[in-house]
Image (cartoon, rainbow, N blue to C red):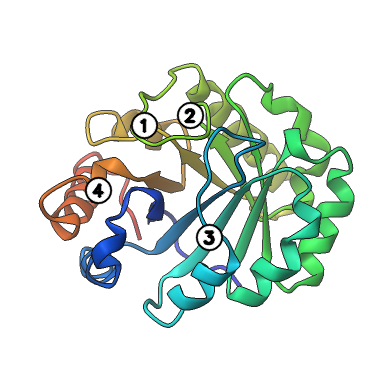
Amino acid sequence: MLPVLTRFLAPSLLSANFSHLAHDLQQIKAGGAHWLHLDIMDGHFVPNLTFGPVVIDSLKTQTQLFLDAHLMILNPEKYIPAFAKAGCQNITVHYEACPHLDAVIHLIKKQACQVGVSVNPATPIQVLEPILPLVDLVLVMSVNPGFGGQQLIPYTLKKLEWLSNWKTHYQNDTGKTGPLLQIDGGVKLDNLPQVLSAGAQVIVAGSAIFNTPSPQEACQAFIRAAREHKLPFA
């Protein structure tokens, strides 16, 4: 089950230095990171190719961080059991890649994993409204998926604001908190306050953490910045 914390910092493995991966994982853990975000790309749904279940299976022996898999792939239902077996604790799929999204959500649940759904920047967030009560997490892509180091697209923050408003009404009506709200793409220290104010609870950051002299200090800087704006990570 997901830890009952308020906000989470989730460094993205995509930007790590794979030549000394164990060191980088130790650094972000020491810096206060809560999750490890795993960008899974197939070279078809997005124009890049990353890693698969075999790599993740080896990662779980190197870190105690919560393993958060983001499947940017076509036909994710074919691979969900393998990612679950490899140790992924949350599996997020894309609305755009799942013509039968309800069935895919229930397939992930059958693997005893938490389930997330993501939308690309140009996809209206309202398309997810029917399934929001079914999922544990919604991932708002704030860049076009495929490559790290991009600039955050400002209009995507409106999606977080809409989701936050939906969650407020949902909690008032049902007493349930609704899904966690995650953002991925272009999040840096200078826009972190706006991102958190819009409602983000899980912050994915790649180059802003790993492309620095010290990933540990970069994580600590994110946590300090959130605290200074009275929007602290757990």
| SS of the residue under disc 2 | loop
Q: Amino acid at mark 3?
A: Asp
Q: Quadrant of residue 136?
A: bottom right
Q: Please state the horizontal and vertical placement of residue 49, each as a whole percent of the image.
A: 53, 45
- Residue identifier under label 4: 209
- Residue identifier under label 2: 142
Q: Please state the horizontal and vertical placement of residue 8, each as a whole percent of the image.
A: 41, 56
Mark 1 → mark 4, Cα distance in angstroms: 11 Å
| SS of the residue under disc 1 | loop
Residue appearing at x 39%, y 55% in the figure: 13
Labelled pair 3, 4 in contact (Cβ < 8 Å): no
Residue appearing at x 83%, y 53% in the figure: 104
**Identity of the residue furthest to the bottom in this view:** 61
- Residue identifier under label 1: 186
Mark 3 → mark 4, Cα distance in angstroms: 17 Å
Q: Amino acid at mark 2?
A: Ser
The answer to whether residue 175 is left or right of residue 186 is right
Q: How dense is the environment of label 4, judged by Cα within 10 Å: few (below 14), some, or many (20 and up)?
A: many
| SS of the residue under disc 4 | helix
Residue appearing at x 75%, y 38% in the figure: 97
Q: Quadrant of the N terminus?
A: bottom right
Q: Nearer the viewer, residue 232 or 168?
A: 232
Q: Quadrant of residue 46?
A: top right
